[in-house]
Image: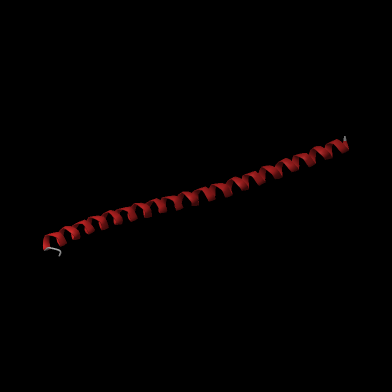
Amino acid sequence: MNTPDAAQHELAALSQQLDRLLDHVHRLSEENRSLRHSQEQLASERASLLARNEQARSRVEAMIQRLKALENNG
């Protein structure tokens, strides 16, 4: 049979375990929030880089067309 002292000891152990689990959940939630924020920043940076790459490609293609036109006229 459980004595009152044993039950109190078990209850205290469960309480400590619950506290540790709650701390762990809190840390994981913060880490998840941070990772989501990083993911959003990286997605935004990627979109910006893709747009810049497209602009550069368009400029290079325009230069090539001008050079071809100069070559044909000259």
Q: Position of residue 24 (x, y in %)?
A: 32, 53
- Quadrant in the rendering for residue 13: bottom left
Relative to 62, residue 11 above or below: below
Q: Nearer the viewer, residue 63 or 51?
A: 51
Residue placed furthest toward the right: 73
Q: Position of residue 6 (x, y in %)?
A: 14, 59
- Quadrant in the rendering for residue 22: bottom left
Horizontal placement of 68 versus 28: left or right?
right
Q: Nearer the viewer, residue 16 or 49?
A: 16
Q: Residue at image x 26%, y 56%?
A: 17
Residue placed furthest toward the front: 1
Relative to 72, residue 16 above or below: below
Q: Which colour style is shown?
A: secondary structure
Residue placed furthest toward the bottom: 1
For the C terminus, the quadrant is: top right
- Quadrant in the rendering for residue 55: top right
Q: Position of residue 7 (x, y in %)?
A: 16, 62
Q: Residue at image x 41%, y 50%?
A: 34
Residue placed furthest toward the left: 4
For the N terminus, the quadrant is: bottom left
Q: Residue at image x 11%, y 63%?
A: 4
Q: Residue at image x 62%, y 45%?
A: 52
